[in-house]
Image (cartoon, rainbow, N blue to C red):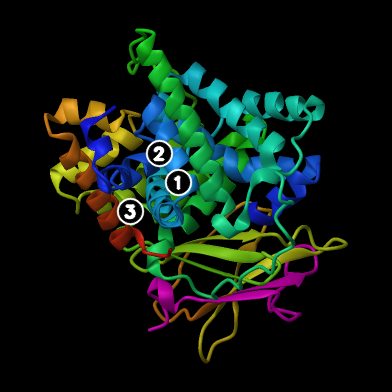
Amino acid sequence: MSPFGRLPGRRPRALHSLAAPYALDALAGTERVRFERHLEGCGRCAAEVRALSEDAVRLAWSTAAPAPHALRERVLAAVRTTAQEPAPSGGPAPARSRPHRPLFVPFATVTAAAALVVAALFAVRAHHVQAELDTARDRTREIAHVLAAPDARAARGGDAHGRGVAVVASVSRGRAVVTLSGYGEPPGDRVHQLWLMRPGAEPRSLGLFDGDTPLVAAGLGRSATSLAVTVEPDGGSDLPTSEPVVQLGLESVGFGE
Amino acid sequence: MEADELLVLVAGGDQKAFEELYGLVSGPVFGLVRRVVRDPAQSEEVAQEVLLELWRSAARFDPRRGSALSWILTVAHRRAVDRVRSARAAGERERRAARRAHQPAFDQVAEEVEAGLEREWVRRCLDRLTALQRQSVTLAYYDGYTYREVAERLRLPLGTVKTRMRDGLGRLRDCLGGVA
C-alpha cells in the first residue's frame, strides 16, 4: 500500500491530478484501471475528464489523412458479417432533440469545419478511379492553397436536419472552399448551384456542385456578403430560378465590407 | 448527414449509414492512428479495428456526452496508444523512415492540406504553450507515451508533468475555442 493511502483525503487528490494524463491516454495498466474505477464514483472528476478529453481531441484535427482504399473494402466486407452489440443496459440513448446549430460558427471552431472539408476530400478520393485522380488532385491543390492562406477562416450554416454548407474562405486569395452536405442529389436532372450574393448586384454563379465534392469558388471580392445554394435545371442557370435551399453569410470569414 | 445522426442509424444495423459514416470519419481516424502508430501496416490494422468497432459498438455512443466525432476519435486514440505501447514493450522500434517512401501523388497533396491545416491552426496554438507544456502534451498524445515516461524523458517530477499537461490542455482550449 502506498504511504499516501493511509492519509485521508490525500489519495483522492492524487487521483484527481491524473485527470489530464487520463484525457491524453497517458495512463497505463493498473493506474488506468484504478482511475477509471474512481471515475465511476466521482461525478465531478467524470465531468472534468470529459472536458479535458474534448480539449485533447482537438489535437486530432491536424492529423487527418486519406485512408487506403483497400481498408474501405475490408471494413465494409467485415461489417456485412459482423454482429452488433446490443445497447448497454439502462436502455439505448433516447431519441433526442438535436441542438440547433448556430448559423455561424466562431473562428474558434475553424478546425472542426476544416476537418469536415478534409473528410469530404477523402470521400471524393474513395469514389474515383486512378484515371480521375488527376482532376481531383488539381482541385485538392487549389483547396490546399485556400486552406493554407494565413487569413483562412471557416463558417458553417445548416438546419435542424443536419444538412448544411461549410466554407473555408480567404479574403486575401479571394477564394472559398464550399462543401454541401446532407442534401443528396436533387430530383430529376436538376443540380445544386452555388451563388455569390452582393448588395446592389445580381447573384453571380460560382459553379455547380457534384455531390459532396467541395467546390472552389474564385474571384470573391471583399463586398461578397453571402453564399446561396439553389436547385436549378441540368447545366445550371444564369440567374437563380428558385428559392435558396441554404444561405450562408460571409461576414464571419472576413468578407462583406 | 452528420456523424451523430449516422451513428444512431448504424446502431440500428443500417449498413448504408455505416458506409456514409465511413466516408466522414475514415480520414480523421486513419490519420490520427497513423500519427501515433507510425508504421503504415500497423496503422491500417488498428484503423480497421477501430472502424469495425464503430459498427459493433455504435449503440454505446451517448450523445449527451459529446459529439460522435469526438467519441470516435477518442476510441481511435486509445487503440492507437495501446498498440504503440505493446509494440514498444515487444522491443519493436519505430520505423519512421519507411513511411512516406512510396506514396502516390494524391496522398502527398492531401498531406499538404493536412500540413496546411496543422500549421495554421493546431500548430499555431501549440506554439502558444510553454515548451514544457507543449512537450508534455505532444509526447503523450502524438507519441503515445505515458505521463511517467514523459517525466523520464523530460527529467521532470511526475507532479510537474501532470500540471503541465493540464495547463497545456487549458491553453489549447483557450486558443482553439473553449466550447465545452
Secondary element at tag 2: helix
Residue wearing tag 1: A39
Q: Which residues are magenta?
A: A228-257
What's the residue type where badge 1 is placed? Answer: Leu
- Residue A32, quarter of the rendered image: top left
Quadrant location, the N terminus of chain B:
bottom right
Distance between mark 1 and mark 3 Cα atoms: 32 Å
Task: Pinpoint residue A175: horizontal percent, then vertical percent.
Answer: 44, 63
* Structural distance between the alpha carbons of marks 3 and 2: 32 Å
Please name the amino acid that badge 3 sits on: Trp
Q: Nearer the viewer, residue A139 or B1?
A: B1
Q: Are marks 1 and 2 in contact (CB under 8 Å)?
A: yes
Label 2 is found on which chain of the structure?
Answer: A
Q: Secondary structure at mark 3?
A: helix
The verdict on residue A149 being magenta is: no
**Overall secondary structure of the magenta stretch?**
loop
As drawn, B66 above or below B53: below
Q: Residue at x 75, y 45 (%)?
A: B11
Please name the residue that numbered disc 2 is placed on. Answer: A35
User: Which amino acid does the dot numbered 2 rest on?
Assistant: Phe
